[in-house]
Amino acid sequence: MPMSLSRAGTRLRRLMKTRTSITLAGMSLLFSLLALWICVYLAGADPYEALTAMFRGAFQGRWALRTTLSEWVAITLSGLAVLIPYRAGFFNVGGQGQLEMGGVAAAVVIMHLPAPPPLALAAALTACVLAGALTAGIPLLLRLSRGASEVTTTIMMNFAAMRFMYAMITGPLQDPGAWYGTTPIVPAGYRLPLFPPGSGIPVSLFAAVGLALGAWWLLSRTVFGLHLRAVGGNRAAAAAAGIAVDRVLIKAVLMGAALAGLAGGFQYLGHTLRVAEGWSKTWGLVGIPVALLGGSPLGVLLVGFLFAVLETGSRSMQALTGVPAALVFVFQGLPVLIYLALGAGLRRMGDAVDAK
């Protein structure tokens, strides 16, 4: 009997592994949608009409579709920027700053590099990748050399990066004809195209999906992915097994930060066409719940799509039904709380069975 109870406890703890993490994420999203439904009802609107208006606002018309898909790209890459370092035990909360610096770097190249459009675009995307990675360099160095908490240092870098961005768009990069802080609009020939031409589908979407699939293969089908999980699970044991833990951590952090920088470059070159005050919303911060709920690169892709629909469709919902668009922010935070609560409940159940 004790043996069977022990096995039951082990099985309950295994529920926290990959498959059940996906199940918990799904349950969290469903409960959150139910909570959103109730909040809409309490706001005095028909929940069905409100959600219909939300999806209509997210997909009806070429501009709405383009906006939703562009948001999906930014949120997906920001989610991967959190997920990949997190697998190595590094909680990257600095995606927003890395994204901002990526946009600024791309703007510098487009404004000052006298080159044909294909070469200028390639250079701008390279610059935003490098800018994102370099922005994570200081928190990474402090973690490796001083053991400083990356949560604190990456948050501080967010503020530094945003202040730097503001200084640039109100100084050397400011559009001479603008009365507020903004870069000049990207010239027509230097913008990322839509594919197929004339559709509402940005070409960056295909890049983001490809990067998510590549990240899935890297994390689950390669030796590096195995080393990543080992370092994140038990750093001391990984070092004892001969894994170069610092090297694995550095690669994971720089890889994630580079994706956040690329998100900024994609948005600047393909959608906003300016780096301005408030241009980037909170894509880098939204990447945190997306990464935690997604649990894997493919999960990030799916959850990121849902968050993008909610983000763009909420404006239409408010305009057509009067339901506050701010309810979407409730949905963005609530699933994480439910996920953590369900996970803690499962762990307690497993420990309780073992104690018997």
Image: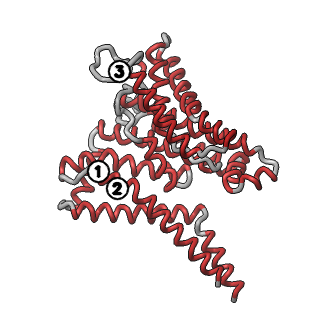
Point out the image quarter for the N terminus. bottom right
Mark 1 packing: few (<14 Cα in 10 Å), some, or many (20+)?
A: few
User: As rendered, which of 276 and 120 lies closer to the eye?
Assistant: 276
Q: Residue furthest bottom?
A: 1
Check disc 3 and give the amino acid type: Ile
103 left or right, relative to 296 = left
Check disc 2 and give the amino acid type: Val
* Location of residue 50 in the rendering, given as x and y in whole percent from the top left corner: 23, 56
* Location of residue 3 in the rendering, given as x and y in whole percent from the top left corner: 71, 84
State how far apart marks 2 and 3 are (Cα): 34 Å
Nearer the observer: mark 1 or 3; the answer is 1
Q: Which residue is drawn at 40% across and 64% down?
A: 30
Q: Residue furthest top?
A: 114
User: As rendered, which of 240 and 287 lies closer to the eye?
Assistant: 240
Tag 3 residue: 185
Tag 2 residue: 330
Q: Residue at x 49, y 13 (%)?
A: 113
